Amino acid sequence: AELCNLRARFAGEVALTSKWVGYIVRKLQDVGVYDDTMIVVTADHGTYLGEHNRTGKFLLDDEQNIAPWPQYDEVHKVPLIIKMPGQTKGKRVKQMVQPVDVLPTMLALAKKKAGLTFEGHSLKPIFEDSRTKWPRDYAYGGFSIRDCEPNFWTMITGKGWCMNTGGSAADAPELFNLKTDPGQRKDVYKQNESVARKMGRAYVEFLESCGTAPEKLELVARKFA
């Protein structure tokens, strides 16, 4: 009963947010600047509403030993909606996108140069031609991907798979087939270790590109050797 109450309140919060976004859109239309305005709607992360024995940042039992804290789609899969100036119809982009891609995209759409180096990529080429090659095969998320042994696991998503790496050397990875198990309930790591190694090695390359501490690189590389 309490979970139903929690979910109902969360649904109400979503409806309230949607309502006020609508007010903003209508006001932009009323004052005549909607067609010239870029609108970006996204979120920093989601929340658990009973999935995986969790609600918010707590467990559904009396023992609140929350570390390690695996990251699942309920937390990492967030909305990204972009309305471009002059856009008359929508399209869905299937490529893997991360929050670091939002700012480069906004600057490119606004035709502005910031003089900065970004780790993210602009989505503008994909908006213009969906066949454009996208440099990102996987999305990575976690509490702190650069720490050596974080209590929060890193999640790798892409190509129909999702893998939690484990926060320390003692933690075995968890691998889920998103096509057959979108709820991420059945760990199939032992049956698909070659898939996990490929994802893990891509993660190592990503960490190297971000200037991650050598200790963390060694930990991850050893796990997926």
Image: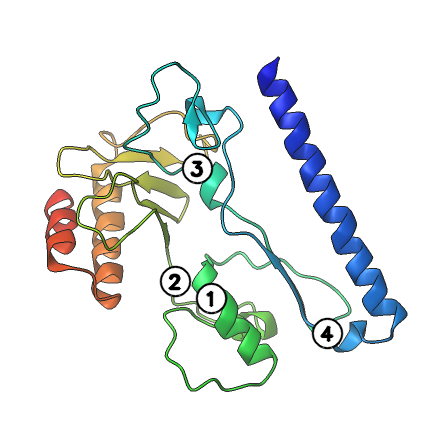
How many numbered circles does the render carry? 4
**SS at badge 1:** helix
For label 1, the crowd category at 10 Å Cα-Cα, with few meaning under 14, some 14 to 19 and many 20 or more, is: some
Residue shown at 49% from the left, 74% from the top: 104
Which of pointers 3 and 1 lies earlier in the amino acid sequence? 1
In the displayed orientation, state which residue is furthest to the right: 30
Question: Of 110 and 56, which appears nearest the observer?
Answer: 56
Q: Is residue 8 above or below residue 19?
A: above
Amino acid of disc 2: Arg
| Image position, residue 129 (x, y; %) | 57, 73
Please state which of the two labelled residues, at mark 2 or mark 1, is closer to the viewer: 1
* Residue at x-position 18% and y-position 44%: 149
Task: Look at mark 4 in the image and give the residue it sits on.
Answer: 37
**Amino acid tagged 4:** Thr
Element under disc 3? loop
Indicate which label's residue lies in the foreground, 2 or 4: 4
Compare marks 3 and 2 and give the one earlier in the sequence: 2
Q: Residue at x 61, y 81 (%)?
A: 110
Vertical side of 166 occupied by 89: above or below: below
- Residue named by callout 2: 136
Looking at the rendered image, the disc whose residue lies closer to the viewer, 4 or 3, is: 4
The part of the image, by quadrant, that contains residue 70 is top left
What residue is pinned by disc 1? 101
Taking the spot 37% from the left edge, 58% from the top edge, the residue there is 137
Gap between marks 3 and 2, in whole Å?
18 Å
Dot 4 or dot 3, earlier in sequence: 4
